[in-house]
Amino acid sequence: MVRWVPKKGLQIAIDGPSGSGKGTVARLLAERLGMPVLDTGLLYRLVGWLMKREGVDLEDEQAVTNRAGELLDEIEWDAQGIRFRGELLDGCLRDEEVGRAASRVAAMEGVRKMLLGLQQQVAQQGCIMDGRDIGTVVLPHAQAKFFLTASQRERARRRWSQLQRSGEDVDLDQIHADIKMRDQRDAARKYAPLKPADDAITIDSTTMRVDQVVDRMLAIMERRGLIEKASSTTG
Ligand code: DC
């Protein structure tokens, strides 16, 4: 498989709605390029999860922002994942309920501002970062920006099959409705709404396999001189 060498300090921003495949694409790209990948959704999921755990009213923006601020120092976030008070969290952040809470706290300006510095600091040495506002707000100077999308039905289907595999019995129409609601909230929010950066390349993955998406991104970055082939072996 062809391996690639990225330019030193390369920042690759991948944004898009839920179910667009950004997480999978980011991980595969990271393997091909030998770069760290950072999932910013984990930050919002952690804040959502903590607020629910502590019973903080999600309608009360000030209370959420204050509490999140107090907890920020206890969060460690890197390419391995996210830790709270030293404990690596994953499964508990992935369920639908936490996703809904994440989407609500992510609409709060104070919460977003608080997490902005952390994201910019972690990205300094170069990385692949995926989220909703990476190309527009977090890393406006990223050398490569991609906006991944797919039809709502296809994104719902992908999420549904992912949840089925992890043993959750869920209804496809319910997932579709949830995705629709979350899309609206993410796109309509005043601060850092979900939208492609002016200089982002949009890729619609509705009818593409994930490896095709990755190959297209690699080809674009090679053309721009951001990555180059390291070696070529078979197998
Ligand atoms: O990608 P995800 O499903 O893990 O994201 C969880 C929520 O966080 C989702 O509603 C969108 C929000 N989010 C955001 O607003 N900005 C980001 N950079 C990442 C996620």
Image (cartoon, grey):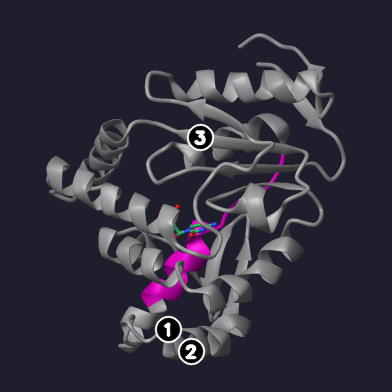
Question: What residue sits 21% from the left and 43% below the top?
Answer: 176
The quarter of the picture where the C terminus appears is top right
Q: Residue furthest top?
A: 234
Q: Which of 178 and 209 is in front in this view?
A: 178
Q: Which of marks 2 and 1 is in front?
A: 1
Tell me the crowding category of disc 2: few under 14, some 14 to 19, or many 20 or more residues within 10 angstroms, Cα based. some
Q: Mark 1 points at which residue?
A: 61
Question: What residue sits 34% from the left and 61% below the top?
Answer: 99
Question: What residue sits 42% from the left and 57% below the top?
Answer: 188
How far is mark 2 from mark 1, CA to CA?
Answer: 10 Å
How far is mark 3 from mark 1, CA to CA?
Answer: 30 Å
Three-letter amino acid code of the residue under disc 2: Arg
The quarter of the picture where the N terminus appears is top right
- The magenta region covers 35-49
- Name the side, left or right, on which 104 lies relative to 40: left
Q: Tell me which corner region of the image, top left, top right, bottom left or bottom right, holds residue 112.
A: bottom right
Q: Nearer the viewer, mark 3 or mark 1?
A: 1
* Residue 221, x across and y down, in percent: 74, 25
Three-letter amino acid code of the residue under disc 1: Glu
**Disc number at residue 76?**
none
Q: Is mark 3 on a helix, strand or loop?
A: strand
Q: Name the residue under label 2.
A: 67
